[in-house]
């Protein structure tokens, strides 16, 4: 399978990349890890006139923890780096858990977190982690920078809120000290899309939940934020009954369809089970 | 649309090649058709199976999912690059001794992923091997012996695992 023809540009600086976007307008498409874009080019679901490959733009491969605890991930930070990151392992359990289960190990070597979020696949894992954590995207253009909440950044399946002259240069994950959580994903085989996935990012103080972010992968037309379950958990002390009710609310928020990966009821059951496990783990750790 | 070919230089198995490529040419096709290194197999062509895995600057990459122009300036290793002048690479030897292949189609990709694994983790556990190879599919389902082959190669390579 061959992609359709395109002009290939490989800018060596951000300024050059941004001016190429201005020059080519809606003909241009950014290439980062390419693990979703190249397959789409080959299937000709995407037929951009110009590919702007940012892999030679220096200084975008980082991920780091800020003094306020927040994580920042540059546009060329590969899943591979996050998978092996000691910083994430120590401070960001939700991202750490997700980084181990994105696609497969070889795809993780090339694919990027920011690129995944831009791709806005409703089945994508990182969006659920981002929504649960309250992540934002930094969009850079020659006009400056703006920060977009992930909920607003993803405007629909495979559609994001970037203007034609903007590049998503960074993702930010606010992470307070003591943040706990995780990501559980059921897949038929490694590399398949999630049958169902549940992301939890939670802060607790004085034995009570001060903030719970819960989001679902693969059980609806888009990433689902479980607002009712989040609100229910606020200021609650976790116990078995509270966990059961939160799991029920999360399962209610899911909008799964029956397909070859399982029935709608089964997927709802998986959502409830996963949230029960994630919250149960926090209850056990707190004890 | 008028699209110009790009001149790139890729070092494949230690030998520098300067070639003119169309931007849409995939790395797998440059290797197989352009450089006639047909040891790199194209299996699914949809980024699932890992048969086309090669090392780009030492890192396993699905060569059907990377443009040849992106490989400009890199060092690529294909299965042909594992063999010295006559001797098999320890990983190849392991696949031979432990019968780590049936039809053999997935084997080049399996072996290149293994080479990278053993460089990073010279003494992997069985679980770690299965995890590392989880992006490489064997439709003969011969995973048991593939894992044994990797174990064998890990033993054969020096304990520090720096050679490969």
Image (cartoon, coloured by chain):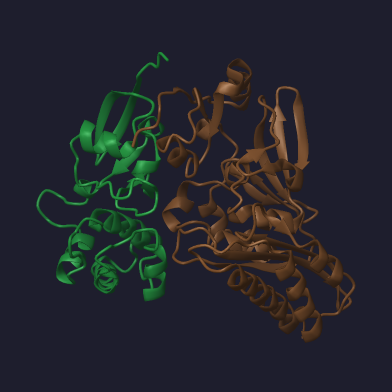
Chain colours: A brown, B green
Q: Where is residue A261 in the image (x, y as percent from the top left)?
A: 50, 65
Q: Classify residue A32 as left or right of residue A106.
A: right
In which quadrant is the N terminus of chain B drawn? top left
Q: Is residue A234 left or right of residue B8?
A: right
Residue A247 placement: quadrant: bottom right
Task: Quadrant for residue B97, please give it.
Answer: bottom left
Q: Which residue lies furthest to the top in this view?
A: B2
Q: Is residue A256 above or below residue A279?
A: above
Q: Nearer the viewer, residue A130 or B121?
A: A130
Examine the rendering and report whether any part of residue B23 can be seen. yes
Q: Residue A271's x, y, as percent?
A: 65, 70
Question: Between B147 and A116, which is closer to the camera in this rendering?
Answer: A116
Total numbered labels: 0
| Image position of B161 with respect to B58: above or below | below
Q: In which quarter of the image is the C terminus of chain B?
A: bottom left
Furthest residue toward left: B86
Query: What residue is drawn where x is 71% and y is 57%?
Result: A224
Residue A245 locus on image (x, y percent) = 79, 78
Residue A239 in view: no
Residue at the location (61% across, 27% down)?
A: A14
Looking at the rendering, which quadrant does residue A126 occupy? bottom right
Q: Measuring 67% from the left and 24% from the top, which residue is drawn there?
A: A165
In this orientation, which residue lies closer to the viewer: B11 or B149? B149
Q: Residue B157: horizontal and vertical position, in percent? A: 26, 65
């Amino acid at each position: 399978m061959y992609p359709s023809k395109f002009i290939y540009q490989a800018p060596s600086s951000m300024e050059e990349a941004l001016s190429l976007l201005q020059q080519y307008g809606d003909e241009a498409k950014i290439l980062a890890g390419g693990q979703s874009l190249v397959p789409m080019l080959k299937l000709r679901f995407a037929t951009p006139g110009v590919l702007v490959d940012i892999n030679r733009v220096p200084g975008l491969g980082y991920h780091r923890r800020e003094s306020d605890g927040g994580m920042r991930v540059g546009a060329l930070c590969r899943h591979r780096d996050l998978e092996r990151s000691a910083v994430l392992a120590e401070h960001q359990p939700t991202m750490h858990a997700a980084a181990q289960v994105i696609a497969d190990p070889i795809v993780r070597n090339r694919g990027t977190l920011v690129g995944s979020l831009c791709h806005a696949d409703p089945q994508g894992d990182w969006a659920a982690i981002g929504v649960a954590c309250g992540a934002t995207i930094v969009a850079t253009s020659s006009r400056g920078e703006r920060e977009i909440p992930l909920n607003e950044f993803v405007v629909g399946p495979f559609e994001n809120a970037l203007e034609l002259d903007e590049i998503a240069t960074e993702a930010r994950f606010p992470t307070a000290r003591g943040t706990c959580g995780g990501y559980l994903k059921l897949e038929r085989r490694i590399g398949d899309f999630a049958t169902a996935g549940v992301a939890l990012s939670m802060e607790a103080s004085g034995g009570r939940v001060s903030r719970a972010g819960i989001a679902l992968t693969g059980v609806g037309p888009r990433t689902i934020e479980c607002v009712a379950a989040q609100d229910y958990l606020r200021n609650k002390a976790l116990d078995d009954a509270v966990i059961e009710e939160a799991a029920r609310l999360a399962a209610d928020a899911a909008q799964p369809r029956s397909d070859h990966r399982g029935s709608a009821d089964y997927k709802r059951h998986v959502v409830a089970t996963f949230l029960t496990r994630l919250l149960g783990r926090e209850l056990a750790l707190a004890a | 649309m008028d699209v110009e070919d790009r001149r790139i230089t890729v070092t494949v198995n230690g030998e520098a090649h300067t070639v003119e490529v169309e931007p849409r040419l995939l790395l797998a096709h440059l290797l197989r058709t352009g450089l006639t290194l047909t040891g790199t197999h194209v299996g699914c062509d949809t980024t699932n199976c890992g048969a086309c895995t090669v090392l780009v600057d030492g890192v396993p990459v699905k060569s059907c999912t990377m443009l040849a122009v992106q490989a400009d300036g890199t060092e690529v290793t294909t299965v042909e690059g594992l063999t010295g002048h006559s001797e098999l690479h320890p990983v190849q030897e392991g696949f031979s001794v432990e019968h780590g292949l049936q039809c053999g189609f997935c084997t080049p990709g399996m072996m290149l992923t293994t080479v990278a694994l053993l460089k990073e983790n010279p003494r992997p556990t069985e679980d770690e091997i299965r995890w590392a190879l989880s992006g490489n599919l064997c439709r003969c389902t011969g995973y048991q012996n593939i894992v044994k082959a990797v174990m064998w190669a890990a033993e054969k390579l020096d304990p520090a695992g720096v050679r490969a």
